[in-house]
């Protein structure tokens, strides 16, 4: 593992934020670069679950999604909130559950970056049009090979650097929201969902429902 200069990375992240007109917090601490990271198979399997659950937001019947997850041995990857959704009918989902599923798309995009399926993940741009092509097509019964065989985990220092940027971006956008200040093309919702995926990747002790998102 490459040596990670956490203070240098912090300064780089802060400089990027300031270039976009944002504010920084000097007292915001750095992550421990020795945090236990997940392996590529764990990332790929979580991405498969995200992609499957996301289809429910696009009106896919829940029983169909539940069967696909079971058929591809992903039941153990589900967290409590996802299991609860899969026990419901589509019409019975709450507005919050629908919203949570919708935002899975940003977390999935982040894991595509983590696994090297996309080259860039600009924080001020939405998900790329190529995401659907990168993912297994559940409508035609594709399996998880697109993720399980093609993903290659980025070097640890790259993952740490991106997590640090989104972590500090989260502080800026949250503070701006509280102060009623604009953030231009940088959306706090996008920042939060992508940061969650990055934090989850670099902290193997958290499950998806309990990722530490403190700032």
Image (cartoon, grey):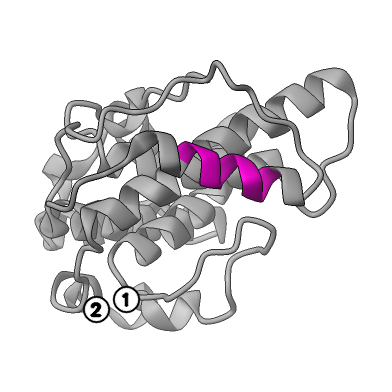
Position above or below: 188 against 137: above
- Which of the pair 68/100 is nearer the observer? 100
Q: Where is residue 123 in the image (x, y as percent from the top left)?
A: 61, 56
- Which of the pair 178/4 is nearer the observer? 4
Q: Which mark is residue 146?
A: 2
Report crowding for label 2: few under 14, some 14 to 19, many 20 or more residues within 10 A (C-alpha): some
Residue 191 visible here: yes
Label 2's element?
A: helix
Q: Position of residue 20 (x, y in %)?
A: 77, 50
**Which residue is at a point 48% across and 19% down the rendered structure image?**
214
Check whether the beta carbons of the residues at disc 1 and disc 2 lie within 8 A of each other.
yes
Dividing the picture into quadrants, the one containing residue 202 is: top left
Position above or below: 185 against 121: above
Label 1's element?
A: loop
Dominant secondary structure (helix, strand or loop) of the stretch shown in magenta: helix
Report crowding for label 1: few under 14, some 14 to 19, many 20 or more residues within 10 A (C-alpha): some
**Residue 15 counted in the magenta span:** yes
**Which residue is at a point 48% across and 37% down the rendered structure image?**
10
Per the rendered image, the range of residues in magenta is 10-17
- Which of the pair 48/199 is nearer the observer? 199
Position above or below: 38 against 55: above
Q: Which mark is residue 136?
A: 1
């Amino acid at each position: 593992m490459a040596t990670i200069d956490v203070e240098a990375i912090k300064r780089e992240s802060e400089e990027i934020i300031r270039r976009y007109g944002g504010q920084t917090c000097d007292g915001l601490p750095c992550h421990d670069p020795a945090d236990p990271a997940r392996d590529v198979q764990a990332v790929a399997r979580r991405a498969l679950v995200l992609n499957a659950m996301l289809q429910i937001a696009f009106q896919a019947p829940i029983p169909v999604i539940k069967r696909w997850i079971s058929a591809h041995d992903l039941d153990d990857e589900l967290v409590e909130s996802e299991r609860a959704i899969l026990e419901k009918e589509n019409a019975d989902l709450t507005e919050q559950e629908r919203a949570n599923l919708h935002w899975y798309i940003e977390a999935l995009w982040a894991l595509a970056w983590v696994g090297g399926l996309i080259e860039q993940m600009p924080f001020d741009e939405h998900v790329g049009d190529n995401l659907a092509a990168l993912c297994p097509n559940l409508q035609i019964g594709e399996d998880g090979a697109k993720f399980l065989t093609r993903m290659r985990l980025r070097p640890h220092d790259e993952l740490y650097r991106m997590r640090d940027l989104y972590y500090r971006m989260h502080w800026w956008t949250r503070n701006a929201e509280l102060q009623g200040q604009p953030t231009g093309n940088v959306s706090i919702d996008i920042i939060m969902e992508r940061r969650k995926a990055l934090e989850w990747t670099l902290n193997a002790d958290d499950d998806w429902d309990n990722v530490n998102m403190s700032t």
